[in-house]
């Protein structure tokens, strides 16, 4: 039987595609280009989390759509989107 931690919370970060750099498979958006739930500039993404959800233009993306580190989220071919498209990353932490 799996052990489930009793506490879960979420941390959300928002930005736009236009804040990203790179092209094709190397397109990424730095964590510092996001704002957090308090509306202040983020310094890093969480280093440990249960899972994360990526929303592009408000639509939940499949898990294989991205990869994340504490410093950036990589969204292959994200540069093909319009610069004003909103990006939300939600981390579920425990």
Image (tube, rainbow, N blue to C red):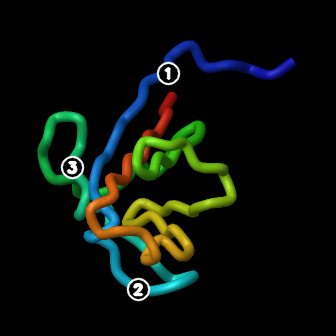
Q: Is residue 76 left or right of residue 87?
A: right
Q: Residue shown at 66%/51% (left/top)?
A: 63
What is the distance, in whole Å, between disc 1 and disc 2 at their CAs? Answer: 34 Å
The residue closer to the viewer here, 94 or 90, is 90
Residue furthest front as drawn: 82
Residue at mark 1: 8
As drawn, the residue found furthest toward the bottom would be 23
Q: What residue lies at 21% left-to-right and 49% top-to-bottom?
A: 35
Q: Secondary structure at mark 1?
A: loop
Query: Which residue appears farthest toward the top when viewing the image?
Result: 6
From the image, tell me which residue sits under label 2.
22
Please identify, in this view, whether the residue under mark 3 or under mark 1 is nearer the observer.
3
- Relative to 6, 22 lies left or right: left
Assign a secondary structure to mark 3: loop
Vertical comparison of 25 with 5: above or below: below
Q: Is residue 21 left or right of residue 65?
A: left
User: In the displayed structure, does residue 65 sit left or right of residue 23?
Assistant: right
The answer to which image quadrant residue 30 occupies is bottom left
Instruction: Provide residue 44's location: percent of width, then percent of height.
Output: 31, 57
Kindly indicate whether the residue at mark 2 contacts the one at mark 1 (C-beta within 8 angstroms). Answer: no
The quarter of the picture where the N terminus appears is: top right
Q: Secondary structure at mark 2?
A: loop
Which of labels 1 and 2 is toward the front?
A: 2
* Mark identifier at residue 35: 3
Disc 3 or disc 2, which is closer to the eye? 2
Judging depth in this view, the residue of 36 and 54 nearest the camera is 54
Crowd around label 1: few <14 · some 14–19 · many ≥20 (10 Å): few
């Amino acid at each position: 039987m799996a052990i489930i931690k009793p506490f879960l919370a979420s941390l959300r970060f928002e930005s736009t595609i236009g804040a990203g750099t790179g092209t094709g498979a190397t397109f990424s958006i730095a964590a510092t280009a996001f704002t957090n739930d308090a509306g202040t500039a983020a310094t890093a993404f969480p280093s440990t989390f249960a899972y994360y959800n990526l929303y592009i233009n408000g639509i939940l993306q499949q898990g294989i759509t991205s990869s994340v580190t504490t410093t950036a989220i990589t969204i292959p071919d994200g540069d093909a989107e319009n610069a004003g498209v909103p990006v939300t990353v939600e981390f579920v932490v425990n």
